[in-house]
Image (cartoon, rainbow, N blue to C red):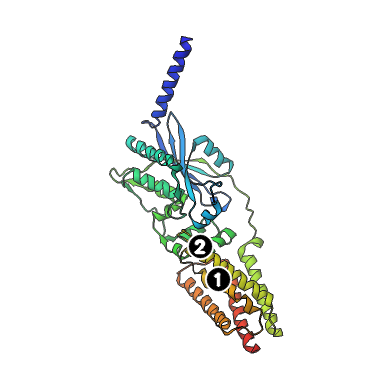
Amino acid sequence: MQSLLRFLLLFFISFSFAQTEIISEDTQVSILTFGPGQNLNDAFGHNAIRFHSRFSDIVYDFGRFDFDAPNFYLKFAQGKLNYLQGKEHYKTLIGAYINSNRTIKEQVLNLSFQDKKDFYAYLENNYKKDQGAYLYDFFYDNCATRVRDITETTLKGNLEYKQSETYKPQTFRALIYEHVHWNTWGSFGIDIALGSVIDRDASLREQMYLPEKMNHVFESATIKDTGEKLVTNSKTIYEEKKRKNNNTFLLSPIFILGIVALLILFITYKDNKNKTRTKILDLIIFSITGLVGVLIFLLWFATDHTATANNYNLLWAFPLSLFCIIQLLKEVPKKWFIAYIKFSILMLCLLMMHWVIGVQRFAPALLPILIALVIRYVFLLRHYKLAK
């Protein structure tokens, strides 16, 4: 019995010691970079921080959220949803990403013992405060930028980023296209929802909002005081297996919207030839452009999302179009409605100017629709002029 009690006492003492000495001289702190997944929400990859010692193997990451949070969807739309810090055992997390067939890379950081303790203390203390709840921002406060910022804080600014031979200035939107092809519905939605604020060049540090970019920049980064490289060892833990491409051109935005534009042009041609007007077409056009305009307007002015500001998609999709529906039912509408059509044509011309000079880049698949709208609006002016 005494032997058993002695064993249990030694066990609990050892266990307690292990818990208080998580960070040791041989602890490795590394950055994990996970490749893109198949869905839009994981198309840009992910980053995490690993602490590997003889006592434990823990991974911290950012960007998690609770689906059961009160008013989840409303807060998400408003940009007021709290995102959380994650903490998980290495094998559990890695197993999940391997099962999802996503590439996993690891970079061991060149940190002093004190740096490791500071790094760990920051993450643990942050996690204890409501699981590190924070307001997420896709470009400026996400899973990658959090890892970058904490590394910079730990090293107290003693970190220098260097441009690699492959570096080139790119806008935030162009960087998105590297991960989401322009002729996909995901990219189309992004181009509709996000404004001109993402059409400026991102600096080298700002490009690190993308996990893969952060991986590249960290690879060439150095410690200022010593000139040593930040990353001492890099390896690929898992390489994704080739996936089957399920995308089909017949379901792509450029094809679908091209067909819709041709249908608008064909109906407009027939209306012009027969000196009539297909009211249902105009009702659909003004209803859809008006509703899209309301969505863009709310994302710009009624949310905390920084990337939805200054969105000039309002030049083709304007909320006031919804107030024109009653006028479309009349053979001879009010004079203000005629002026509104002229205004809409002018706005479409202004949109094209914004596109050409680079104020904002719009969804390429939108071009056939814009051409069809201009022609339809010109037809409406001619039709109402003859109807007087």
Question: How many neighbours does mark 2 have within 10 angstroms: few (below 14), some (14-19), or many (20 or more)?
Answer: many
In this view of the protein, can residue 194 be seen by the observer?
A: no
Question: Mark 2 is on which residue type?
Answer: Leu
State the SS at label 2: helix
* Residue drawn at x 57%, y 58% as measured from the top left: 186
Q: Earlier in the sequence, mark 1 or mark 2?
A: 2
- x and y percentages locating residue 113 in the rendered image: 33, 34
* Residue drawn at x 58%, y 81% as measured from the top left: 337
Please tell me which residue lies in front, 268 or 221. 268
Residue 328 quadrant: bottom right
Question: Mark 1 is on which residue type?
Answer: Pro
* Residue drawn at x 42%, y 63% as measured from the top left: 200
Q: Residue furthest left?
A: 225
Please tell me which residue lies in front, 4 or 69. 69
Q: Is residue 244 above or below residue 185?
A: above
- x and y percentages locating residue 213 in the rendered image: 44, 51
State the SS at label 1: helix
Q: Count the marks: how many?
A: 2
Q: Is residue 293 above or below residue 187?
A: below
Q: Which mark is residue 121?
A: none
Q: Is residue 98 above or below residue 335?
A: above
